[in-house]
Image: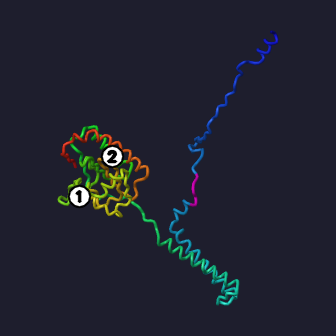
Amino acid sequence: MEAGTLLRSAVPLSPTRRRFVSRPNSVRASLSPRGGYQGPRPKREWVADWVSKNDDFVRSLPIYVGGASLFAVLFNRTVSGIAPVADASSSQSRADLLTLGLAVTNILNGLVWLSIRPKSISVVNPNGVECQRIYHDLPDPVISELIWAWESLSDVTCCRSLVVIYDGICILQIGFADISNSNGSEPMVVDTDKLMKGSLYNGVLKSGSQSYLANLALYPGKSELPFLPSNTQAVILQPLGDKGIAIVGGDTIRGFTSSDQVWITLIGEKLDATLAKVVYRMPLTVQEGI
């Protein structure tokens, strides 16, 4: 009994386990007494920065290198006492011919770099007038949601025109619109019948996915969107379920980023869910506000 008592007291039945707490790696950053930041800094690409700031010099650099190489070969040929006529049996002549070929290649490469330049993309001012046409019989929450969609897109993207068509009715036309032919100060009204017969509208509804016309001037379907400003640079056609479409016009070529496209898709799904509840009660009259 005594031995059992001593063994039981010496070896505990539930020994204490050590806990190992993993501490996440942290980065320390602080401010010096003078207010300077002390901590990790983003790595700078010095070569890329220098090239972007000296674009003209970098493009013409092969011409300078090729010209200097050509002059060096001719100068070496002159002062070395070698006959000016190339001799295939001479190693010096073969090396000079190879160097001349490389020099001419550099010069031609520099000329190509100077002739081919990326086209600068800039923001344009829409050729049109501002308008705001909203279906008059919509409930106030739906109108507020449409206005929210417009303000969200116009504030954070290059959107300058927004047209929403649902169940064959123009629910919203806001932003810049092309000038009507009949009156030089009136914005053009969206002809929904003509638009719904076009290939752009039917193609988007048939595919059920977003269509991004990054450079509208290159697409023949531009004629199907006469209500947008004539110098609209990019357009996104976002389907609203199988009953409508949202037309988003931008003022910059390829101005809508991939994040903007995802954001417009989510807004389209939200508008479709909202309009599907009230569209069957709307009469065929429109309230116009300019």
Q: Which residue type does callout 2 highlight?
A: Gly
In this rendered view, identify the residue nearer to me: 42 or 213: 213
Picture quarter with the N terminus: top right
Find the distance from the CA under tag 1 to the CA under tag 2: 30 Å
Q: Nearer the viewer, mark 1 or mark 2?
A: 2
Residue range highlighted in magenta: 43-47
Task: Determine the residue positioned at 67% across, 83% down.
Answer: 94
In the image, is residue 57 above or below residue 248?
below
**Residue 165, x across and y down, in percent:** 27, 49
Label 2 belongs to which residue?
241
Residue drawn 18% across and 45% down? 284
- Determine if the magenta segment contains residue 46: yes
N-term-proximal mark, 1 vs 2:
1
Q: Is residue 260 above or below residue 84?
A: above
Find disc 1 in the rendering and name its residue.
179
User: In terms of image quadrants, where is residue 255?
Assistant: bottom left
Q: Position of residue 170 (x, y in %)?
A: 24, 49
The location of residue 285, given as percent across then percent down, is 18, 45
> Residue sitting at 78 percent across and 17 percent down?
10
Q: What is the secondary structure assignment of the residue under circle 2?
A: loop
| Amino acid type at mark 1 | Ile
Up-down relation of residue 214 to residue 112 (above or below): above
Viewer-side residue, 207 vs 160: 207
Q: Secondary structure at mark 1?
A: loop
Along the line of sight, the residue nearer the viewer: 251 or 192: 192
Residue farthest to the front, as pictured: 206
Quadrant in the rendering for residue 281:
top left
Q: Residue at x 26, y 54 (%)?
A: 196
- Where residue 103 appears, as percent x and y from the top left, is 59, 78
Q: Are marks 1 and 2 in contact (CB under 8 Å)?
A: no
Residue reaching furthest to the right: 3
Q: Is 265 in the magenta?
A: no
